[in-house]
Amino acid sequence: MNNVVALESTVIAHGLPRGVNFETALNMERAVRKNGGEPKTIGILNGEIIVGLREEQIMRLGTAPNVLKVGTAEIPYATAMKRDAATTVSATMAIAKRDGISVFATGGIGGVHRGKDWDVSQDIIELSRTSMIVVSAGVKSILDVPKTLEFLETFGVTLVGYKTDSFPLFHCSRSPYRVNLTINSPEEALLILKEKERLGIDGAVLVANPIPETDSMDYDDLSRLIETALSTAEARGVSGKALTPFLLSTIAELSNGKTLDANISLLINNAALAGQIAGSLGAEL
Ligand code: PSU
Ligand code: MN
């Protein structure tokens, strides 16, 4: 094991607006470094899989038109067709694993969408089969949270709250939903991954890391914004891979940027924790 932290690129190309995406990507890398990890942002350029994008390559994924959003299943399309592609949580995990990386920081994993029968993110399937520590601020409350939690359980993902027993909802540090298992230090995440591997149990350790309290939004306020965004998406027929980016940008507009500030804060916070976890991995050697 080494002290590398994988970072995804969908959040850069499709999750955050231009103007803040590039800077946030670099700030996530800095947060990893500051905490003892070595960041490697993952993406696909001209069909080439790159683990550890350089600054100008991150800029390209953040600004170029026609950047694909790929989950694991779409990686071979992007490489065969020599496309530029941003990797989601599932694709980033699949690539990182091949490179021997054990720690990954994202904002929030994909899950089960509300009201849409069977719009379930590939992220959950990848989490069920790939051995890795994934740091996420819980899941976005734009999703069907109870169903996402049930799916995580069904698919054998080891879910632990970081210093909390309340399941964090991305922009909100607390929620009415519980996590059954809690850890209190970066080293404990590592211990659990090692036990998974020792016992031959496949899949990820998903660390639900709450957004810092100072940037956390009110759950009821946020719920109202999300209801509005969901009806707009419905009315405009937005679905599939476009749905998550559409909902995120709509609530950012409706909240005058408040959800965007929260999103950036939790991304940096997750990168910092992943850096600490990977730092303790490096120290093991
Ligand atoms: N976290 C963020 N912003 C994002 C995402 C996560 O803060 O844009 C991305 C991740 O790459 C995740 C994807 O894998 O959204 C889920 O997309 P979908 O629901 O289409 O599977
Ligand atoms: Mn989907």
Image: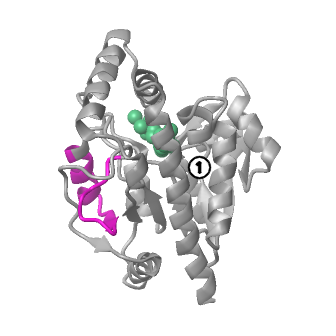
Q: Is residue 90 visible?
A: no
Q: Residue placed farthest to the front in the image?
A: 214
Please state the extent of the stretch shown in magenta in the rendering.
146-169
Quick check: is the Cβ at mark 1 less than 8 Å away from ligand 1? yes
The residue shown at (17%, 50%) is 176
Q: Nearer the viewer, residue 194 or 36?
A: 36
- Circle 1 crowding by C-alpha within 10 Å: few under 14, some 14–19, many from 20: many
The residue shown at (33%, 52%) is 173
Residue 281 falls left or right of residue 168: right
The quadrant of the picture occupied by the C terminus is bottom right
Q: Position of residue 209 (x, y in %)?
A: 40, 60
State the image quarter where residue 103 is shown.
Answer: bottom right
- Per the image, label 1 sits on a secondary structure element best described as loop
Q: Amino acid at mark 1?
A: Glu
Q: Residue placed farthest to the bottom in the image?
A: 285
Pointer 1: what residue? 8
Question: In the figure, 213 relative to 203: above or below?
Answer: above
The residue shown at (55%, 72%) is 276
Q: Position of residue 11 (x, y in %)?
A: 56, 41
Q: Is residue 193 visible?
A: yes
* Magenta span includes 184: no
Q: Position of residue 255 (x, y in %)?
A: 40, 26
The residue shown at (57%, 80%) is 281
Q: Image quadrant of ligand 2?
A: top left
The quadrant of the picture occupied by the N terminus is bottom right
